[in-house]
Image (cartoon, grey):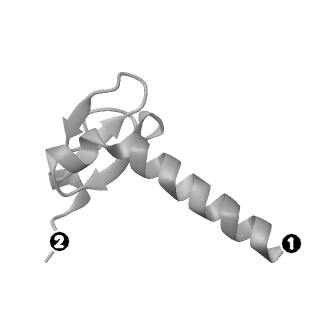
């Protein structure tokens, strides 16, 4: 069973730091991630998802 979001890791896009729980305002963080390591790679995951979605949108047009 997954942990509550308040008990998971988040990536703070403003500071570039990984945080546990709700340490910063929601506008500054992305996640949640189950592990510290996964949160460290948040920007890579966001870029990959954006590229995937852009390709899917282009294929629909």
**In the picture shown, does residue 32 fall above or below 27?**
below
**In the picture shown, does residue 24 fall above or below 10?**
above
User: Residue 11 at what x, y percent from top left?
Assistant: 32, 39
Which residue does the image show at 68% across and 59% down from the upper left? Answer: 54
Which image quarter holds the C terminus? bottom right
User: Residue 45 at what x, y percent from top left?
Assistant: 41, 51
**In the picture shown, does residue 60 fall above or below 47?**
below
As drawn, is 49 to the left or to the right of 21?
right
Which residue does the image show at 74% across and 67% down from the upper left? Answer: 57
- In the rendered structure, which disc, 2 or 1, sits on the residue that comes first in sequence? 2
Q: Which mark is residue 24?
A: none
Q: CA distance from mark 2 to mark 1?
A: 37 Å
- Label 1 sits on a secondary structure element that is loop
Q: Which residue is mark 1?
A: 61
Within-10-Å neighbours for mark 2: few <14, some 14–19, many 20+: few
Q: In which quarter of the view is residue 1 placed?
A: bottom left
| Extreme residue in the top direction | 15
Q: Which residue is mark 2?
A: 2
Tags 2 and 1 touching, CB below 8 Å: no
Which residue does the image show at 25% across and 58% down from the upper left? Answer: 5
């Amino acid at each position: 069973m997954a942990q509550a979001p308040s008990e998971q890791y988040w990536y703070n896009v403003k500071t570039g730091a990984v945080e546990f729980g709700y340490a910063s305002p929601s506008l500054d963080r992305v996640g949640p991630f189950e592990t510290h390591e996964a949160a460290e790679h948040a920007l890579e995951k966001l870029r990959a998802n954006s590229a995937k979605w852009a390709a899917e949108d282009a294929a629909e047009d």
